[in-house]
């Protein structure tokens, strides 16, 4: 399998190359040249398999020759062995139609662990074959940062520089990042929003002053390997609820469009997906794009679901590329227009293609609270504010009664205890495995939201590529 850039002009790479490269050199995102597809019989044969085996089966076509099948399975067993639930991503029933896919049983209590535990091992595997050092530069609105840091802390040949918007992540999220004191971990709090941080990260990949000296790598969902690993839990949930013989709908709390794009990939691979419901908070660029074709960047509004406070959704580019007939030159022009004007109109093909599988809904503060309260009062479950956006959207989506609707529970409620307590009167507690998070020393530098300041800091502390 090789990987091409959504903007058409970067060199095609194999899986190992795309994993280490992160973002393509033309500013595009890597996507597989074609979508592998399983037959109905192949999908049926996946039922009942342990998660690590299912993961190796689903990911094998994407990994291609970069790893043997045995090695891929070893890495999956190591990655998912760290999860606190034997099923890794269990499903739980809410009512006759509504289900919850719990993605927060990993070390840092959010869905990011599912991909990042594996990605940390993939980096180690692929870097072990060369003399290269990797300088990971990431942006986080709270969860990617902690999951990536947990996955690479203390690993050889890797430094990680993680930018978060100062004061705009929860205290638990911040501490999960800043209390990791391994020498290869560098936390940077910047003035501004997640979008500002993400823009700086993307710019660094195409800044020769940085790329000549450092091999810049990505842990954000711009890295294809992140999405590949997330495809697996759509299969896991679908199989438990009757796939391939029965279609399943998914409601996905969405910010950067990574998680829901993984659902799109699962559908491309043959999983019978009835609908993908894109659930946003009031930072609703995706809801606007999917309902009116207008993809225009708004100002980021801080909400109780801070990890979704995003107004430029990186992975939407992957969908637009696929729906636009994989025409890299056309998409490069469309993205250049967006970067210049902050507005973009979807083409008819893109809008109609999206409408065939996606619907969307947005939740404001009251609707988030109501969904948290409903889950607690009607189903006895505490859910976090991100998951609440998904539940709100799932219940209003009008999916046919015979089709199960699975909301992705993307974070543990104890990461956002204030919002949960406000809605239910119950304060969720952190699982014991998180330990003494509130007693640990924190380390983080404060920088202005200024590209020159951030790159100077990275250049001073990173190890040259070697
Ligand atoms: C808890 C939580 N839910 C949902 C999302 C949105 O996921 P995505 O950015 O893949 O759309 C994020 C961040 O990305 C998150 O941290
Ligand atoms: N919600 C994310 C934002 C970054 O998204 P990513 O999936 O592209 O890494 C976070 O919590 O950091």
Image: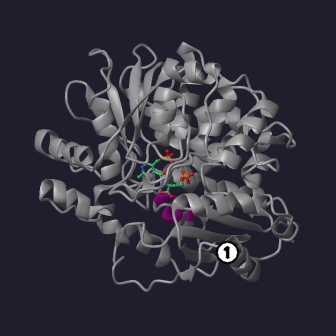
Q: Position of residue 50 (x, y in %)?
A: 46, 38
Residue drawn at 33 percent across, 18 percent down: 403
Magenta span: chief secondary structure: helix
Q: In the rendered structure, which segment of residues is drawn in magenta?
A: 143-148
Residue closest to the eye, 37 or 350: 350
Could you tell me residue 398's position as x and y percent? 30, 21
Residue 432 picture quarter: bottom left
Q: For this rendering, which residue is in front, 116 or 54? A: 116
- What is the x, y in percent for residue 170? 37, 67
Total residue callouts: 1
Q: Secondary structure at mark 1?
A: helix
What's the image's color scheme? one colour
Q: How many other residues sit within 10 Å of disc 1, few (<14), some (14-19) or many (≥20)?
A: many
Residue at (29% x, 14% y) in the render: 402
- Judged left or right of residue 449, residue 85 is left
Q: Is residue 455 above or below residue 17?
A: below
Outermost residue to the bottom: 441
Q: Going by the picture, which residue comes out furthest to the front?
A: 341
Identify residue for label 1. Answer: 454
> Could you tell me which quadrant the C terminus lies in?
bottom right
Residue 163 point in image, percent of width and height: 58, 69
């Amino acid at each position: 399998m090789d990987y091409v850039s959504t903007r058409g002009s970067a060199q095609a790479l194999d899986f190992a190359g795309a994993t280490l490269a992160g973002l393509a050199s033309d500013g595009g995102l890597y996507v597989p040249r074609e979508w592998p597809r399983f037959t109905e019989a192949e999908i049926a044969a996946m039922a009942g398999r342990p998660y690590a085996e299912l993961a190796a089966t689903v990911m094998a076509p994407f990994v291609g020759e970069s790893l043997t099948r045995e090695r891929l399975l070893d890495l999956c067993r190591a990655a998912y062995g760290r999860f606190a639930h034997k099923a890794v991503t269990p499903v739980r029933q809410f009512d006759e139609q509504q289900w919850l896919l719990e993605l927060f049983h990993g070390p840092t209590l959010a869905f990011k662990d599912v991909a990042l535990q594996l990605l940390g091992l993939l980096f180690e595997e692929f870097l072990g074959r060369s003399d290269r050092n990797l300088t990971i530069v990431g942006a986080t609105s709270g969860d990617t940062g902690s999951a990536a840091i947990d996955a690479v802390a203390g690993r050889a040949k890797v430094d990680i520089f993680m930018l978060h918007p100062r004061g705009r992540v929860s205290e638990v999220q911040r501490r999960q990042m800043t209390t990791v004191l391994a020498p290869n971990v560098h936390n940077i709090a910047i003035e501004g929003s997640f979008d500002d941080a993400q823009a700086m990260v993307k710019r660094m990949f195409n800044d020769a002053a940085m790329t000549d000296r450092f091999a810049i790598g990505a842990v954000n969902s711009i890295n294809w390997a992140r999405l590949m690993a997330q495809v697996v839990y759509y299969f896991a949930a679908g199989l438990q609820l009757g796939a391939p013989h029965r279609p399943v709908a998914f409601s996905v709390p969405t910010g950067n469009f990574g998680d829901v794009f993984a659902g799109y990939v699962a559908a491309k691979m043959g999983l019978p997906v009835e609908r993908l419901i894109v659930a946003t908070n009031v930072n609703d660029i995706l809801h606007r794009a999917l309902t009116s074709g207008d993809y225009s960047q708004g100002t980021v509004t801080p909400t109780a679901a801070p990890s979704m406070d995003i107004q430029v959704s990186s992975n939407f580019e992957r969908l637009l590329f696929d729906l636009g007939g994989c025409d890299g030159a056309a998409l490069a022009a469309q993205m250049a227009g967006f970067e210049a004007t902050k507005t973009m109109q979807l083409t008819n093909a893109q809008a109609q293609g999206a409408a065939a599988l996606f619907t969307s809904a947005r939740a404001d503060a009251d609707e988030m609270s109501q969904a948290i309260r409903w889950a607690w009062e009607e189903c006895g479950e505490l859910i976090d504010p991100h998951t609440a956006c998904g539940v709100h959207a799932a219940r209003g989506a009008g999916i046919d009664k015979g089709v199960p609707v699975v909301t992705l529970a993307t974070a543990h409620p104890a990461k956002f205890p204030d919002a949960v307590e406000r809605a239910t009167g119950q304060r969720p507690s952190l699982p014991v495995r998180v330990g003494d998070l509130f007693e640990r020393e924190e380390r983080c530098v404060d920088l202005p939201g200024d590209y020159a300041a951030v790159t100077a800091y990275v250049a001073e502390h990173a190890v040259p590529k070697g």
